[in-house]
Image: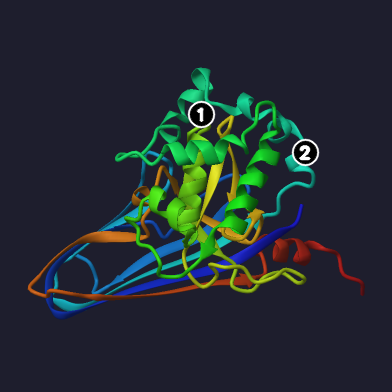
């Protein structure tokens, strides 16, 4: 199995025309430790230096950061840095096991499925409309292998919806995206999730990053140089089959997963509360996912006997 390593830098800067006297923040900029992905290093720094800062593990297993800045400021910068290893999927994984089984077998059931119930429930207000059910019905035909159905859903969203930067916001509803047939990565992920949930499958919203420089022979994908979003469908055994409708593919070693939740609001990179007289603010985000040599591969190379 091949493996790639990345050094990730995620910088978010908020600027205010009037001084901010207090800023509370919560964010998810630390990659997950999970099967197929190893977090070797991670840090989050805040400037100005916070009075209080801590990490926590949330209900879904994501690593979040909290901070409170009490010194007066007109600019706030949050920088997440990490070193991550990502494994390529095993060859043939889509044609074996539960991925190749009828999709009905992957509906949450029993004690094992209890862990997936949160990812089965619709949002509030509801996102599963009659149009969503109808759209998904032709894809999730009875007895169809799960991976085949998910691939069809991925490809249909990719071909039938138009990627248009800035056309939506985080509050845009799935019904609006279905009507317009346009949006961005978070919209396409949410459409896919609503379709899967409409037929009793548990699905999660995933936030993360794409490699800035693709491997040799691979095309650069939409969403590089920024935070990205995709979806995953739950498999018994608390495993996930992740896919990216924005780029028409299943997730591979080019993706770095940061957090998994029911929707964007669960895994927002940064959100918070400020105390200021300013009526507006501006935000800039810079993301770099740079391929590097894996420390473990380097160690193995050092252990190889050399002639002479």
Structural crowding at the residue carrying mark 1, measured as other residues with C-alpha within 10 Å and reported as few (<14), some (14–19) or many (≥20)? some
Q: Position of residue 261 (x, y in %)?
A: 42, 44
| In the displayed structure image, the side of residue 217 where residue 193 appears, left or right | left
Q: Is residue 114 above or below residue 269?
A: above
Residue visible at 39% across and 53% down in the picture:
176
Q: Position of residue 83 (x, y in %)?
A: 54, 64
Residue visible at 71% across and 33% down in the picture:
145
| In the displayed structure image, the side of residue 25 where residue 65 appears, left or right | right
Q: Quadrant of residue 168?
A: bottom left
Q: Is residue 52 visible to us here?
A: no
Q: Position of residue 55 (x, y in %)?
A: 34, 53
| Secondary-structure class at tag 1 | loop
Residue visible at 42% across and 40% down in the picture:
60
Where's the C terminus, which quadrant?
Answer: bottom right
Q: Position of residue 109 (x, y in %)?
A: 52, 20
| In the displayed structure image, the side of residue 44 where residue 230 appears, left or right | right
Q: Nearer the viewer, residue 258 or 80?
A: 258
Query: In the rendered image, which residue does mark 1 sit on?
Result: 200
Residue at the limit of the structure toward the bottom, as seen here:
17
Residue at the limit of the structure toward the top, as seen here:
110
Q: Nearer the viewer, residue 63 or 182?
A: 182
Mark nearer the N terminus (2 vs 1): 2
Q: Nearer the viewer, mark 2 or mark 1?
A: 1
Q: Is residue 244 above or below residue 101?
A: below
Q: CA distance from mark 2 to mark 1?
A: 22 Å
Query: In the rendered image, which residue does mark 2 sit on?
Result: 95
Residue visible at 68% across and 28% down in the picture:
102
How has the structure been colored for display? rainbow
Q: Nearer the viewer, residue 179 or 76?
A: 179
Q: Quadrant of residue 65?
A: bottom left
Structural crowding at the residue carrying mark 2, measured as other residues with C-alpha within 10 Å and reported as few (<14), some (14–19) or many (≥20)? some
């Amino acid at each position: 199995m091949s493996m790639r390593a990345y050094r990730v830098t995620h910088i978010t800067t908020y600027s205010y025309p009037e001084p901010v006297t207090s800023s509370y923040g919560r964010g998810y900029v630390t990659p997950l430790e999970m099967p197929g992905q190893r977090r070797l290093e991670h840090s989050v720094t805040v400037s100005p230096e916070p009075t209080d800062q801590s990490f926590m593990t949330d209900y879904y297993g994501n690593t979040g950061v909290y901070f409170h800045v009490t010194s007066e400021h007109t600019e706030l910068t949050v920088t997440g840095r990490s070193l991550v290893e990502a494994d390529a999927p095993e060859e043939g994984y889509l044609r074996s096991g539960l991925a190749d089984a009828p999709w009905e077998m992957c509906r949450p059931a029993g004690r094992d499925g209890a862990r997936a119930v949160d990812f089965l429930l619709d949002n509030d207000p509801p996102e599963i409309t009659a149009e969503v059910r109808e759209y998904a019905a032709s894809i999730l035909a009875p007895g169809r292998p799960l991976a085949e159905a998910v691939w069809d859903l991925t490809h249909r969203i990719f071909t039938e919806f138009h990627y248009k930067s800035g056309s939506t916001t985080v509050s845009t509803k799935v019904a609006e995206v279905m009507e317009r047939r346009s949006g961005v990565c978070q919209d396409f992920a949410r459409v896919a999730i609503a379709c899967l949930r409409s037929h009793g499958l548990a699905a999660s919203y995933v936030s993360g990053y794409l490699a800035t420089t693709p491997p040799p022979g691979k095309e650069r994908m939409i969403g590089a140089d920024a935070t990205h979003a995709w979806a995953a469908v739950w498999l018994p055994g608390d495993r996930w089959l992740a896919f990216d409708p924005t780029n028409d593919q299943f997730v591979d070693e080019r993706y770095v997963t940061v957090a998994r939740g029911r929707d964007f609001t669960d895994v927002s990179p940064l959100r918070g509360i400020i105390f200021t007289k300013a009526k507006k603010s501006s935000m800039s985000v810079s993301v770099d996912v740079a391929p590097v040599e894996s420390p473990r591969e380097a160690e193995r190379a050092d252990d190889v006997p050399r002639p002479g």
